[in-house]
Image (spheres, rainbow, N blue to C red):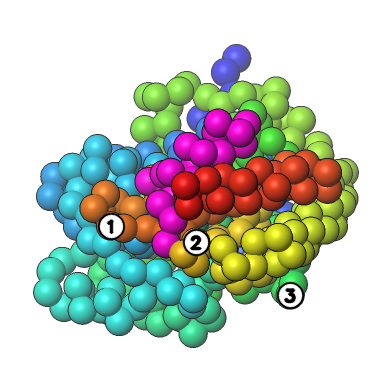
Amino acid sequence: MYGPEQGSENLRTELAHFLSETRGLNVGAEDILITKGVQMALYLTAQILLTKNDTVIVGEPGYSGANEIFEQAGAKLELVPVDDDGIDLDVVESICKKKKIRLLYVIPHHHTPTTVTLSSERRMRLLEMAKKYQFAIIEDDYDFDFQYSSSPVLPLASANYYGSVIYVGSFCKTIAPGIRIGFMVAPSNFLLQATKLRKLIDRQGEHLLEEAMANLLKNGDISRHLKKANKLYHERRDELCRLLHEHLADEVSFKVPEGGFAIWINYINKHDPVRVAENAAELGLTVSNGIDYYHDKNFKNYAVRLGFASLNTTELKDAVDLLKKAIKKCYN
């Protein structure tokens, strides 16, 4: 027989324990829907909540994959700046006073692409605003498990005493992008609608893979893997920061991220990221051109996101050497 549309019961049970221990979420198996990564969770949410011309608030710069989903559902985007403490809630409130907001999308932990974390104060204020102005929050917590410098701030969903947060995450970053197992935690009435819609799209998930993931969680294999991965990625973050300081201090500026897989750098001398990326490609290095970060394609951007997690020490050194050469070619 087919498995349950909501996902493997074993996986949802073990995942509930995992989310409780690591994120402070008070949930059970019945509160979780298994999805094919975060992307499916975002799509399901948009299809259920949004109708034509609804207003959705998103961060700018932000995750284009989410923006495209909201627009495909017919929504209009309100772009809000992201600073060192996360999405600017003063701007959010000014928008809420002028028009009805249906949904706010936020990446509070290691925001994509800037890597900043939404402060504790802003998290509580955002929950209060969601209650006051009656909008839903999608909390995309794609890499909560990777934190190097301090204890992570708990998710909005852990303090969600108004039932306004739809919490989504995945194991795609924990293990590998090819492992398409994501999850959604939401109020029961919404979860029921999402489960029915998921059944129409994809009768059930990868049941055998879900059972295997349940065993990995139950046996502690995921926790042990995360401990090793955090140590390794911490070392690689530090190594990339050291190399950038040593070889490109006159060309790039950045803040050391507290966790995650990337560093957000600014080209000090206002080099065009598109040209730098083209130069790098000619040298055999793939680096972002920054175009996807901004919904406003006319915005002149001099910052890009450099990933470090997949590169060993030798590869990081080679990558920085090539990036240095690519930047130097911009002076010609």
Count every numbered label the image shows and give the total.
3
Could you tell me which quadrant the N terminus lies in? top right
Give the image quarter of residue 65: top left
Rendered position, 289 above or below 206: below
Whole-angstrom CA distance, mark 3 to mark 2, is 28 Å
Crowding at label 2, few (<14), some or many (≥20) Cα neighbours within 10 Å? many
Whole-angstrom CA distance, mark 1 to mark 2, is 15 Å
For marks 3 and 1, the one nearer the N-term is: 3
Q: Amino acid at mark 1?
A: Phe
Determine the secondary structure under disc 1.
Answer: loop
Q: Are marks 3 and 1 in contact (CB under 8 Å)?
A: no
Would you say residue 279 sits in the magenta stretch?
yes
Residue lying farthest bottom? 121
Q: Are marks 1 and 2 in contact (CB under 8 Å)?
A: no
Determine the secondary structure under disc 3.
Answer: loop
Q: Residue at x 65, y 57 (%)?
A: 260
Q: Amino acid at mark 3?
A: Ser
Would you say residue 44 sits in the magenta stretch?
no
Q: Is residue 1 visible?
A: yes
Rendered position, 283 above or below 110: above
User: Label 1, on which residue?
Assistant: 299
Residue 310 rendering spot, x and y as whole percentages:
73, 41
For marks 1 and 2, the one nearer the N-term is: 2
Q: Which residues are magenta?
A: 270-291
User: Label 3, on which residue?
Assistant: 150
Residue 79 rendering spot, x and y as whole percentages:
27, 62
User: Label 2, on which residue?
Assistant: 267
Q: Is residue 330 left or right of residue 60?
A: right
| In this rendering, the label closer to the viewer, 3 or 2 | 2
